[in-house]
């Protein structure tokens, strides 16, 4: 755990969040500023800054993807959904504890619109 990391503190329960699913290695909680009817963030419990670091831990990377799929099921996203890893400055990443955005619940339009 990194004490200065917002998402490590959410994982530890030090900062409240609406958790929708939890496994031994991942936590899924609602985004505080949802951009779609359903907008959930999936994070590994272990701190990795971004998806390039997460790729170095393939077992946990697979757990993050499996949790994203489980969230889509729990949220009833039968029409489809999007899984996004914003990465680095050009990718618009603001929190440097890797997280998959799982968004859906309505047609999302072209990806880069
Ligand atoms: P990024 O731009 O890093 O991919 O996305 C960070 C996301 O974290 C944003 O969508 C933002 O709304 C969300 N976020 C920022 N602070 C908090 C918080 O304290 N709690 C929750 N649940 N989400 C947050
Ligand atoms: Zn962290």
Image (cartoon, rainbow, N blue to C red):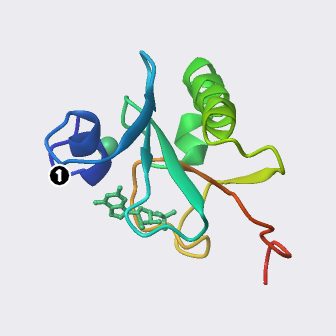
Q: Position of residue 2 (x, y in %)?
A: 21, 41
* Secondary element at tag 1: loop
- Camera-side residue: 8 or 49? 8
Image quadrant in which the N terminus is located: top left
- Pointer 1 residue: 4
User: Where 8 falls versus 34 (above or below)?
Assistant: above
User: Where 9 falls versus 30 (above or below)?
Assistant: above
Q: Residue at x 61, y 70 (%)?
A: 91
- Camera-side residue: 37 or 45? 37
Q: Residue at x 55, y 57 (%)?
A: 39
Q: Residue at x 26, y 43 (%)?
A: 10
**Ligand 1 is located in which of the four quadrants?**
bottom left
Residue 27 sits in which quadrant? top left
Q: Residue at x 64, y 29 (%)?
A: 70
- Camera-side residue: 66 or 57? 66
Q: Position of residue 42 (x, y in %)?
A: 51, 41
Image quadrant in which the C terminus is located: bottom right
User: How dense is the environment of label 1, judged by Cα within 10 Å: few (below 14), some, or many (20 and up)?
Assistant: few
Whether residue 99 is visible: no
Q: Position of residue 75 (x, y in %)?
A: 62, 42
């Amino acid at each position: 755990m990194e004490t200065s990391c917002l998402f490590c503190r959410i994982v530890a329960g030090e900062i409240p969040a609406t958790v929708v699913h939890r496994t031994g290695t991942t936590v899924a909680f609602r985004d505080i500023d949802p951009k779609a009817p359903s907008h959930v963030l999936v994070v590994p419990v272990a701190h990795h800054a971004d998806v390039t670091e997460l790729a170095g831990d393939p077992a946990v990377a697979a757990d993050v993807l499996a949790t994203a799929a489980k969230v889509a099921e729990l949220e009833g996203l039968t029409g489809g959904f999007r899984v996004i890893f914003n990465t680095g400055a050009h990718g618009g990443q603001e929190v440097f504890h890797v997280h998959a955005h799982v968004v859906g619940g309505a047609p999302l339009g072209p990806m880069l619109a």
